[in-house]
Image (cartoon, rainbow, N blue to C red):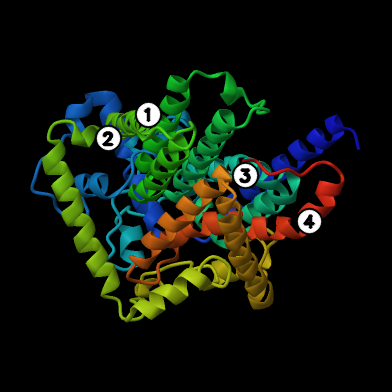
Amino acid sequence: MPDSRKRLADIAFVLALMLYVLHGTAQVPPHADEYMQIAAARDFFLLREQGAAALAFAPPVEVDTLQYLRLLNGTLHKNLVGMLWAASGRTQEELPNIYAWAMPLSWNIANGNVPSQDQLHLARWASATLTALGVVPMFMLGWHLRLRAVAYPAALLYALHPVILLNGRRAMLEGSLIFFSLLSMYWLVALIVAEHSATARSFVVKLPALARYGVLGILLGLTVASKHSGAIVAAAVLGAAFVTGTVRDSPPRPLRALSWVAFTGIVSVLTWFALSPHFWNAPLGALRALLAARSELLALQASDSTLAYRSLGERLVAILTQPFLSAPQYFEAPNWAGLLDDQIAAYQRSAANGWDWGAPIGLLLTASALFGALNMVAEARRRNLIAWAILAWAGAAVLASIAVPMNWQRYYLPLTLVSIVLAAEGIGQLLVRREANSGEAKSLT
């Protein structure tokens, strides 16, 4: 097949997967966090109409208030929802009130805390669109690893993964976190290729170093502004950028690499800060309040005896089982048990819920991810710098997952993303010899 037709096939494949992600958006069973995130979109209207002073940090912080939600959550999603809300002709007054978790769903509906179906579906487009766009950087990450042999299975596993579809389509923070995490990792890999491959033809090659690292910093800032757990990806990217930058020259020049990493880190912090007006008037006070609120919330979540882990062994088992061996978790709060049974059953019967591969395929994918990780270690020993970056990402995700004290599936999404890349690498390893014989596959070192 001519290269031009192969590229058209690649584009068609990616677009088909993106459309599939979007197709099932309205069918996903709801989650009360969606209602809270839609309520938080009031900040978009407050900022637009009254300026940053309306969002200023002002202690004390009371639970289930807008200020509480500002501290606990990222800023990108609520502003995107606010933009969609305004573009559709809706007003701030039509937004739902903040959902009260201590009260039953019926009470929240009666008190205006639950949006209508049309309002919910509108708000979901903000997250679902970004989740769909995530197919592109996932495909490109696989391409840089082993061309089509990894790009195709990586994009396919991503777009058909039931957990990614469930959480990414909902009107919550996960869509923006997923997209900007993947885009940050792709940009790091493209930067590595641009600086270390004499045959690289990417547009990144044509950018000056200041622009390369500046864009990386902006993407990391957007990742953390999506959700605080984006700091996992930021740490992995900065660490990998330092290591790969150090070995760029012979002899190694760690001070040069450190300067570029410092610049990237500063740009990322400034980007996040610019998108967080509730920090502007009292950054340290807001940060302390954030850490305290997050700690209290995590302790409350972990107090649920049915979901809390009782030992380190259970946490380690979760690292193995969450990416490919765990069924989608439609809710976490025990008082939602039984409320969604009909909607969950309808969603699972539809063709929109992804690939329900079951335990046998899940075991094969888990084994493939472990095999892919071992292959990355072997590639790293051969100074494949892209492998170093992927391993840094995987290591950060595993360490963060060990710290998760309870079985909340959303908290494992960073681990699931890198596990998909590793599983695709394992699959690609079985195909690469055939591609190598056709002159397509090569190692990017």
Which amino acid does the dot numbered 4 rest on? Leu
Residue occupied by mark 4: 431
**Amino acid type at image mark 2:** Ser
- Check disc 1 and give the amino acid type: Arg
Question: Can you say whether 432 is above or below 316 in the image?
Answer: above
Q: Secondary structure at mark 3?
A: helix
Residue at disc 4, secondary structure: helix
> What residue is pinned by disc 2?
276
Q: Earlier in the sequence, mark 3 or mark 1?
A: 3
Q: Earlier in the sequence, mark 3 or mark 2?
A: 3
- The dot on residue 135 is 3
The alpha-carbon separation of the residues under discs 3 and 2 comes to 27 Å
- Asked whether residue 102 is in view, the answer is no
Horizontal placement of 375 versus 319: left or right?
right
Q: Quadrant of the C terminus?
A: top right
Quarter of the image that includes the N terminus: top right
Q: CA distance from mark 4 to mark 1?
A: 39 Å
Residue 430: image x %, image y %? 76, 60
Circle 2 — which element?
Answer: loop
Disc 1 crowd, CA 10 A, few/some/many (<14, 14-19, 20+): some
Q: Decide: marks 3, 1 in contact (CB < 8 A)?
A: no
Is residue 432 toward the left or the right of residue 212 in the image? right
Determine the residue positioned at 22% across, 25% down: 50
